[in-house]
Image (cartoon, grey):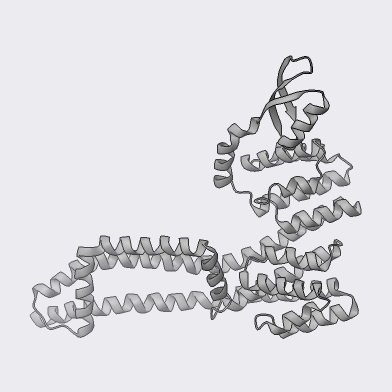
């Protein structure tokens, strides 16, 4: 970072200038070592904080961009290009303005003597704890290139895993949203006009048609109030789910849902086994590895399970003891982890667990898409059929009686 400073020399002369330092405290130390008495120090980046916050909100660094970043970095490190030169070269090819600022800050920090992992740690909104710890282990072991490869592969696999579930759910979600929007418009503006014909004829209609008439009349007058209630409910629900209590409750609901619940559980187990295996292979102690993995699972229920496992290991116990007590962990996982602990091959066993549940997730997401499509069509068909039967049949019968 760059700091503007005003200082006094030993002879009382005033000096102004710019100094590079990773922090304000370090800038003060550098000035004092140069026999300068600091009067004021201000970061040049302070004026850019608002712009940076704006970029952070609108230009979030995606997992795809992180994969490209680490892949390019691994190639440059393998070619023995210095880390600062490598980051500068990558920064020139990056299109995300917020990511450009982050990489530039990392370059400045490394130039000031900070390690690569420490510079990443200052940007936890971009780099996960998992990535930071793997890079830190690579710096300690002297094999940074391998660690960067690990991070790139890990982000890519996690991205693929999450995308698989999203792609299976996005189509039915969009269909249902569009269906309810069209249904709201039809009930509010079209149905009242159709039922008006029936009311004008003063004909006897069945109870279900009478229900449609009442609902249509109500919506024709108060559709705006219902729309406000629906929007308010969605906003309130979104706000609640963004709170800690809401997130905890939603995480519990997700893994207990009838059709997609097992898929979510398998995703979290795959993520646990994959990430823990990578950390252990990278030389991270198991207690720290479990703590880091719990923070990237993205589910409070599983996070608590793995934190409890870390506490158990810290007390001298086994991770499998805690996993066995949880109903959300399949028995097969517990048995395999136990075998890995007894044989000393826990990282290898975790790799097999991750592979198995990744394949299971892929099969289940494909089956989900195949299952949901006909169910959606049946649901929409019944809804449309009921509306047509309730409105058009009375009109048809009345027209037949007139003839």
Q: How many marks?
A: 0
* Percent x, y of residue 92: 71, 36
* Res 271 → quadrant: bottom right
| Quarter of the figure that contains the N terminus | top right
Q: Is residue 174 visible?
A: yes
Q: Nearer the viewer, residue 334 or 92?
A: 334
* Res 52 → quadrant: top right
Q: Residue at x 75, y 24 (%)?
A: 37
| Quarter of the figure that contains the C terminus | bottom left
Left or right for 400, reference 273: left
* Percent x, y of residue 10: 79, 18
* Percent x, y of residue 16: 70, 19
Left or right for 108, reference 238: right
Q: Nearer the viewer, residue 260 or 193?
A: 260
Q: Nearer the viewer, residue 25 or 67?
A: 25
Up/down of 332 relative to 140, above or below: below
Q: Residue at x 43, y 75 (%)?
A: 377
Up/down of 100 relative to 300, above or below: above
* Percent x, y of residue 239: 46, 60
Q: Residue at x 71, y 37 (%)?
A: 104
Q: Is residue 189 visible?
A: no
* Res 176 → quadrant: bottom left
Q: Nearer the viewer, residue 369 or 2?
A: 2
Left or right for 215, reference 14: left
């Amino acid at each position: 970072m760059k700091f503007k400073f005003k200082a006094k020399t030993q002879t009382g002369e005033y000096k102004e200038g710019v100094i590079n330092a990773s922090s304000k405290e370090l800038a003060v130390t550098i000035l004092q070592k140069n026999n300068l008495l600091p009067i004021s120090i201000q970061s040049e980046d302070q004026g850019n904080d608002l712009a940076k916050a704006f970029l952070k909100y609108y230009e979030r660094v995606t997992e795809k961009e992180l994969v490209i970043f680490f892949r390019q970095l691994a190639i440059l490190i393998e070619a023995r290009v210095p880390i600062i030169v490598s980051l500068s070269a990558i920064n020139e090819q990056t299109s995300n303005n917020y990511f450009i600022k982050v990489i530039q800050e990392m370059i400045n920090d490394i130039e000031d003597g900070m390690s690569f992992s420490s510079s990443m740690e200052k940007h936890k909104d971009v780099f996960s704890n998992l990535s930071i710890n793997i890079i830190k282990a690579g710096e300690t072991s002297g094999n940074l290139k391998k660690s960067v490869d690990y991070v790139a592969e890990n982000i890519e696999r996690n991205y693929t895993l999450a995308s698989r579930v999203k792609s299976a759910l996005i189509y039915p979600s969009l269909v249902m949203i569009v269906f309810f929007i069209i249904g709201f418009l039809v009930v509010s503006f079209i149905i009242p006009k159709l039922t008006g014909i029936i009311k004008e004829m003063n004909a006897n209609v069945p109870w279900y048609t009478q229900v449609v008439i009442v609902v249509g009349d109500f919506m024709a007058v108060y559709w705006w109030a219902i729309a406000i209630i629906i929007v308010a409910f969605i906003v309130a629900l979104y706000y609640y789910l963004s709170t800690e209590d809401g997130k905890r409750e939603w995480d519990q609901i997700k893994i207990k849902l009838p059709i997609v619940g097992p898929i979510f559980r398998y995703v979290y187990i795959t993520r646990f086994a994959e990430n823990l295996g990578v950390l252990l292979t990278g030389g991270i102690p198991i207690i720290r590895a479990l703590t880091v993995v719990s923070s990237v699972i993205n589910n409070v229920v599983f996070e608590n399970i793995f934190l409890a496992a870390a506490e158990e290991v810290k007390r001298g116990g086994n991770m499998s003891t805690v996993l066995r007590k949880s109903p959300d962990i399949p028995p097969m996982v517990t048995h395999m982890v136990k075998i890995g602990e007894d044989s000393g091959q826990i990282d290898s066993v975790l790799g097999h667990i991750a592979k198995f549940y990744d394949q299971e997730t892929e099969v289940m997401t494909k089956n989900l898409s195949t299952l949901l499509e006909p169910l959606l069509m049946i649901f929409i068909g019944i809804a449309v059929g009921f509306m047509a039967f309730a409105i058009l049949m009375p009109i048809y019968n009345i027209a037949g009686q007139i003839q």
